Structure formats: structure tokens, C-alpha cells
Image (spheres, rainbow, N blue to C red):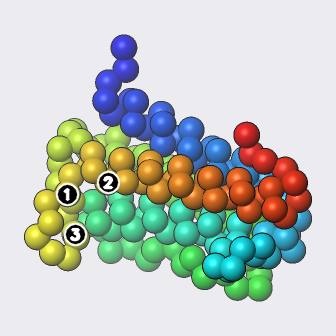
Amino acid sequence: MSTERETILSLLQFQRESLVRNMSGVDEAAVRESPVPSGTTLLWLMQHMARAESLWIVQRFAGTRDEIADEDSDSDDTMAAAIATYRRTWERVDAIIDDTASLDELCRNLGDDTPLNLRWVLLHLLEETARHAGHADILRELIDGETGR
């Protein structure tokens, strides 16, 4: 039987991998295109998720003041580089989680008095990753007819 932590982390990792699957094999020009009125692109989604994990776990939970990845693309960004950054972010985030004894441990740096714990942060990241993996699946289908399923 899995523990609560193992269950949450395995679900999060599944969603991370789903997001990456949706991005793999897309033409570099297409990852910058947005077939939707909001302007959302596959490249932005990948950069956004690396930033979100860093922001919530490294900065807000662990209280580390490291530079957080930028989610605004420039002309030199590639999907391969964005995926590599996202994967490196997982390693850093997972190391912090592994070094935390309890999911009940509170965030160190929220900037206010909101008592959020690691459990809440992980469930928030699970929800956000799953939501954006779904967005990526739709964008990918609109771009080239492929789905990440």
C-alpha cells in the first residue's frame, strides 16, 4: 500500500511526464504558435510549469531566494531546452520534498500569514500540472493533429 506522499508524488510525476509527452516532436516554429485567442503557446506552457514548481517549492516552501526561471520566451528558446529546464526543476523540487519529514510542514516564504503546508502545495502543483497538460494536449491537436495520450 502506498503512503499519501508516494501517491501524491507518483500522480504529480505522471502529469509531468504527460506534459512533456504533449510537447515532444513538435516543430520548433509551431511551439511558438498559438491557435487560441489567449495567445498561449506550447513553449510558454513548458516554461510556465518550470517556473511554477520553482516558485512554489524552492522559493515559497523552502524559502530559498534563488533566481526563478523566466516564463517569457525569447527568440533563442527551444522546446528541447525548456524541457531540459523543466526536468532539472523536478530534480531540485524532488530533493527538497525528499528532505522534508512531513507533508504538514509549513511554507517558509509566502509573504503573508497564510499557513500553507507542503501537502497543499503539492496538490496545487498536481492540479496545475494536470490542467496545463490538458491545455497542451488541445494546443498540440490544433497545431498538428497529434495528442499526447
The spot of residue 73 in percent (x, y) is 67, 81
Marks 2,3: beta carbons within 8 A: no
Please report the residue visible at 33 percent of the width from the left and 33 percent of the height from the top: 5
Task: State the mark number for residue 121.
Answer: 2
Marks 2,1: beta carbons within 8 A: yes
Label 1 sits on residue: 116
Name of the residue lying farthest toward the left = 113
Asked if residue 146 lies left or right of residue 62, the reply is: right
Label 3 sits on residue: 109
Asked if residue 53 lies left or right of residue 38, the reply is: left
Which of the two marks, 2 or 3, is nearer to us in this view? Answer: 2
SS class, disc 3: loop
SS class, disc 1: loop
- Indicate which disc, 2 or 1, sits on the residue closer to the N terminus: 1
Please report the residue visible at 81 percent of the width from the left and 62 percent of the height from the top: 142
Q: Is residue 134 above or below residue 108?
A: above
Please report the residue visible at 72 percent of the width from the left and 57 percent of the height from the top: 138
On the question of residue 11 being in view, the answer is yes
The spot of residue 99 in percent (x, y) is 30, 43
